[in-house]
Amino acid sequence: MIIPNLMCSDMGRSVAFWRDRLGFAVTMTVDAARETRFGPDAMPETAVFTILEGAGGQLMLQTAGSLAEDLPEGFAGGLPDRPGIAVYLRDLSPDAVAAGLPAGAVLKGPETSWYGMREVYFRDPDAHVICVAAPDGPAPA
């Protein structure tokens, strides 16, 4: 199983985005003192790492400072200007997600691609590109 771990600058803001806008549920958090909490109410103010579940998979969020502590010396620990990852989430409603995003957040769509997927592209609060997609009719032959 591949589980993306996205760096974030504000854990509360990032969790709220994934939970409230995309319907993910918090399953585990770790705070700055390395105390682990489980369940949907496990969101301390000092969380530095969070696992969420939704769209048939898992996603991890980690503050840049916490990730820097886990990596060898020399890691800058800052967020890049443009993160080098795009997350593709299948089987959520692109139209419903787009309708719930703030004005100006959508980069492209919702529209149906040539390969039969209804898609909307947008950025999360830490500038990661997210695409929500669902089949829009039969796949092309």
Image: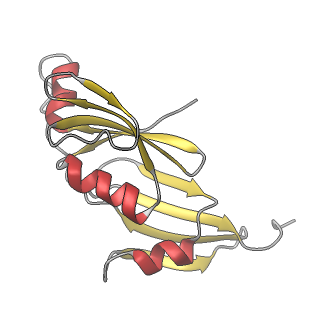
> Residue 23: horizontal and vertical position, in percent?
47, 59
Residue at position x 65%, y 73% in the image? 113
| Residue in front for this viewpoint, 76 or 67 | 67
Q: Quadrant of the N terminus?
A: top right
Residue 36 quadrant = top left
- Tell me if I can see residue 82 in this picture: no
Residue at position x 37%, y 75% in the image? 101
Q: Is residue 84 above or below residue 2?
A: below
Q: Is residue 59 left or right of residue 115?
A: left
Residue 92 quadrant = bottom right
- Give the total of numbered labels: 0
Q: Is residue 86 above or below residue 48?
A: below
Q: Quadrant of the C terminus?
A: bottom right
Residue at position x 60%, y 46% in the image? 56
Direction top: furthest residue? 72
Residue at position x 23%, y 56% in the image? 13
Residue 69 quadrant = top left
Q: Is residue 41 left or right of residue 52?
A: left
